Amino acid sequence: MLALRNLHRLRLVLVYWPLHSYWIQLVLQLTQVLITCLQSS
């Protein structure tokens, strides 16, 4: 049962980590856009 639980946790990490890194990239891009907008105005 322990190995099964670890597999489940590993699957959760594999599913959620790409989403997490995608959101981080999105936030970074948004902040860059905001900074450039503030600098140009």
Image (cartoon, helix red, strand yellow):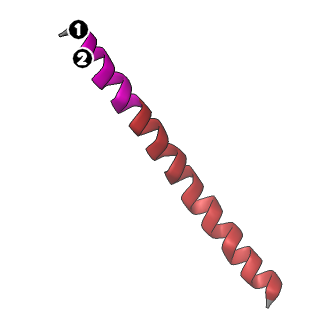
Q: Are marks 2 and 1 in contact (CB under 8 Å)?
A: yes
Magenta stretch, main secondary structure, is helix
Q: Nearer the viewer, residue 18 or 32?
A: 32
Q: Position of residue 35 (x, y in %)?
A: 32, 20
Q: Position of residue 20 (x, y in %)?
A: 51, 51
What residue does disc 1 label?
40
10 Å crowding of disc 1: few (<14), some (14-19), many (20+): few
Secondary structure, mark 2, is helix
- Residue sitting at 54 percent across and 45 percent down? 21
Q: Position of residue 27 (x, y in %)?
A: 40, 38
- Is residue 17 left or right of 38 when viewed as pictured? right
- Is residue 19 left or right of 29 when viewed as pictured? right
- Residue sitting at 57 percent across and 61 percent down? 15
- On whether residue 27 falls in the magenta region, the answer is no
Secondary structure, mark 1, is helix
Question: What stretch of residues is rendered in magenta?
Answer: 29-40
Q: Quadrant of the C terminus?
A: top left
Location of residue 18 with respect to 3 vertically, above or below: above
10 Å crowding of disc 2: few (<14), some (14-19), many (20+): few
- Residue sitting at 50 percent across and 52 percent down? 19
Q: Quadrant of residue 2?
A: bottom right
What residue does disc 2 label?
37
Location of residue 22 with respect to 2 vertically, above or below: above
Q: Position of residue 28 (x, y in %)?
A: 43, 32
Q: Quadrant of the N terminus?
A: bottom right
Residue type, numbered disc 2: Cys
Residue at the bottom extreme, as displayed: 1
Location of residue 14 with respect to 8 vertically, above or below: above
Residue at the left extreme, as displayed: 41
Marker disc for residue 22:
none
- Residue sitting at 64 percent across and 63 percent down? 13
